[in-house]
Image: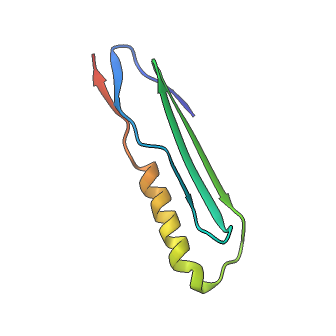
Amino acid sequence: MSISIPEGYAVESIPKAMKISTGENVGLFAFNILSEQNKIQIVITKEINNAIVSENFYPVLKDFYQQMIDKQNEKIVLKKI
């Protein structure tokens, strides 16, 4: 996704890039963000490799999804120049 920053504004802060894995090759989440001049580019990749997982793996999967949601809820802060 590409976002154009309106004229008169600049990026003050953006979330840091992040890559997490569930282990055992069940899932992968990558969040990359880049800010250049008047554009912000965000690339999110999510891979789920198993449709069925053991109930013992549920806490790991729950934590994986929580981290994914938390990262996507981080804010991009703009400042008026």
Residue 37 located left or right of residue 79: right
In this picture the colour scheme is rainbow
Residue 73 located left or right of residue 34: left
Please give the name of the residue rendered at 61% of the width and 69% of the height, measured from the top-left corner.
Answer: 23
Please give the name of the residue rendered at 46% of the width and 57% of the height, measured from the top-left corner.
Answer: 69
Residue 26, quarter of the rendered image: bottom right
Name the residue nearer the viewer: 67 or 19.
Answer: 19
Where is the C terminus found, in terms of image quarters?
top left
Residue 44, quarter of the rendered image: top right
Q: How many marks?
A: 0
Residue 20, quarter of the rendered image: bottom right
Q: Is residue 15 above or below residue 24?
A: above
Coordinates of residue 46 in the picture (x, y in percent): 63, 54
Coordinates of residue 76 in the picture (x, y in percent): 38, 37
Coordinates of residue 80 in the picture (x, y in percent): 27, 20
Residue at the far left: name it.
80
Where is the N terminus found, in terms of image quarters?
top right
Please give the name of the residue rendered at 55% of the width and 79% of the height, measured from the top-left corner.
Answer: 58
Q: Is residue 38 above or below residue 19?
A: above
Name the residue nearer the viewer: 18 or 3.
Answer: 18
Please give the name of the residue rendered at 43% of the width and 22% of the height, measured from the top-left corner.
Answer: 5
